[in-house]
Amino acid sequence: AAVTVTDHTKGATTTSRAVLIEYSDFQCPACAAYEPLVKELTSTYGPQGLTVVYRHYPLPQHNKALLMAKASEAASGQGQFWEMHDLIFAGQADWSKLEVTEAEKTITTYAQTLGLDLTKFNLALVSKVVANKIQADVASAKTAKVVGTPTFFLNGQEVVARTSADFARLIEQSLATTTANVKL
């Protein structure tokens, strides 16, 4: 689906020549394993025209994935989506083993670490706005026929790449063949 203003993007913004969309689940170990790679791609290719988009696809078998998606969106309301995103993935090995009530305490700690207004954060956690954003991402994933996480799309085409070199080759090809800005 086309990138919209509600999407979380990093890398190139106004000069985007390639768009890499990741459908991800904060509780998915493979998604956490790919995080350093996605960061590397963003820092390497962002200046050359790559925009990276994060979309939620919390899987039902992960009982804390939706909570973490809500936490990232609640942080987004205070301009801290990527910061919360990074804390959640960095702590995944710890919070994923906790009971849900303990995981809820963890996200409060993360919000405090980021200096968020906790009242606003807690209200956003249970808000329709946050729920609707996540539902919109899930609907987009279903339209795109995403079945698991992480799933990547480069300029609208699903890509199967496992290594930094695989991604680099695909992104470089895309950047080389796309002269016009991709619509964001």
Image (tube, rainbow, N blue to C red):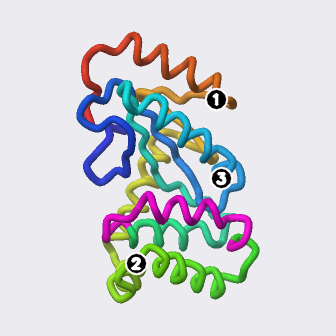
From the viewer's perspective, is 120 left or right of 92?
Answer: left
Residue at mark 3 to residue at mark 2: CA–CA distance:
24 Å
Residue drawn at x 38%, y 65% as measured from the top left: 80
**Which element carries disc 2, helix, strand or loop?**
loop
Residue 129 colored magenta?
Answer: no
**Mark nearer the viewer, 2 or 1:** 2
Question: Tag count in the figure?
Answer: 3
Relative height, residue 172 to residue 40 (above, below): above
The residue wearing badge 3 is 32
Give the x, y percent position of residue 75: 39, 70
**Which element carries disc 3, helix, strand or loop?**
helix
Residue 115's disc number: 2
Residue 86 colored magenta?
Answer: yes
**Mark nearer the viewer, 3 or 2:** 2
Residue drawn at x 42%, y 44% as measured from the top left: 53
Residue at mark 2 to residue at mark 1: CA–CA distance:
34 Å
Instruction: Mark 3 or mark 2: name the one nearer the start of the chain.
Output: 3
Residue 164's disc number: 1
Q: At label 3, which amino acid type do we have?
A: Ala
Give the x, y percent position of residue 90: 63, 61
Residue drawn at x 38%, y 80% as measured from the top left: 121
The magenta span reads 76-95
Give the x, y percent position of residue 3: 32, 41
